[in-house]
Amino acid sequence: MIRYAEQRDAPDLARIYNDAIKPDIYATCDVTPVGPENRLAWLAHHHHPYPAWVYETESGQVIGWCSLSPFSVRPGFSGVAETSVYVDEASRYRRIGTELLRHLIAEGRTLGFRSLVSLVFEKNIASVSTRLRYGFRPHVVMYEVAQMREAWENVLWLQKDLVVEDLLPQ
């Protein structure tokens, strides 16, 4: 079940985010683990029209989360939201990330956004291919802009137009 993230979810949000920091994952530019207090502060900024959601199992375990965030502080970009999707390491490759991305697309439309963007490491093939399958188009490759440990990495900017109606793959 996908539901709005709440303050009580902060430890799970931090745990799942920290899974993405591990070597060779390439899901975030952060390299230092965060604590629940960091996620509480983060949650304080994720409310309408930029909420966060969690994926909770029937037993009540949070195993993934997603969010919409402002793409830019400039008011001309208010119709664009940046997407984030993170899944617990033990729960990856079970289509949970796909469900969360589909949720972001549907909610983005409901919230009136014109476009969604994702910044994804070029070598994160799973994230790139899932976004392409759901109608995100690559627009920019920023070469060697993110320093991860000892190397400079490429980042793709992908965009999904929400104004054009499309059918989401099943």
Image (spheres, helix red, strand yellow):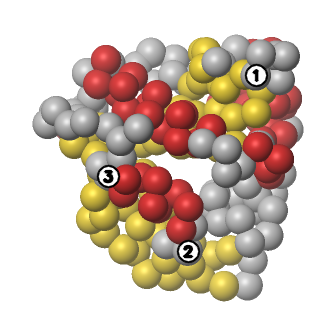
Residue 165: x percent and y percent? 16, 33
Disc 3 versus disc 2: distance between alpha carbons?
A: 17 Å
Q: Is residue 154 above or below residue 56?
A: below
In screen coordinates, is 59 left or right of 125? right
Q: Amino acid at mark 3?
A: Phe
Front: mark 2 or 1? 1
Count of numbered tags: 3
Proximity of marks 2 and 1: CB atoms separated by less than 8 Å: no
* Label 2 or label 1, whichever comes before in sequence order: 1
Residue furthest to the bottom in view is: 151
Reading the image, the residue beneath label 2 is 123
Within-10-Å neighbours for mark 3: few <14, some 14–19, many 20+: many
Reading the image, the residue beneath label 1 is 57
Q: Residue at x 76, y 33 (%)?
A: 63
Residue 79: x percent and y percent? 25, 32
Disc 2 versus disc 1: distance between alpha carbons?
A: 29 Å
Query: Which quadrant would residue 108 be assigned to in this image?
Result: top left
Q: Residue at x 56, y 61 (%)?
A: 126
Q: Quadrant of the C terminus?
A: top left
**Label 3: which secondary element:** loop
* Label 3 or label 1, whichever comes before in sequence order: 1
Q: Residue at x 44, y 34 (%)?
A: 102
In screen coordinates, is 130 left or right of 72? right
Q: Amino acid at mark 1?
A: Thr
Q: Quadrant of the N terminus?
A: top right
Within-10-Å neighbours for mark 2: few <14, some 14–19, many 20+: some
Residue furthest to the front in view is: 170
Residue 136: assigned label = 3
Q: Residue at x 76, y 58 (%)?
A: 21
Q: Is residue 97 above or below residue 67?
A: below
Q: Is residue 69 above or below residue 132?
A: above
Q: Nearer the viewer, residue 121 or 44?
A: 121
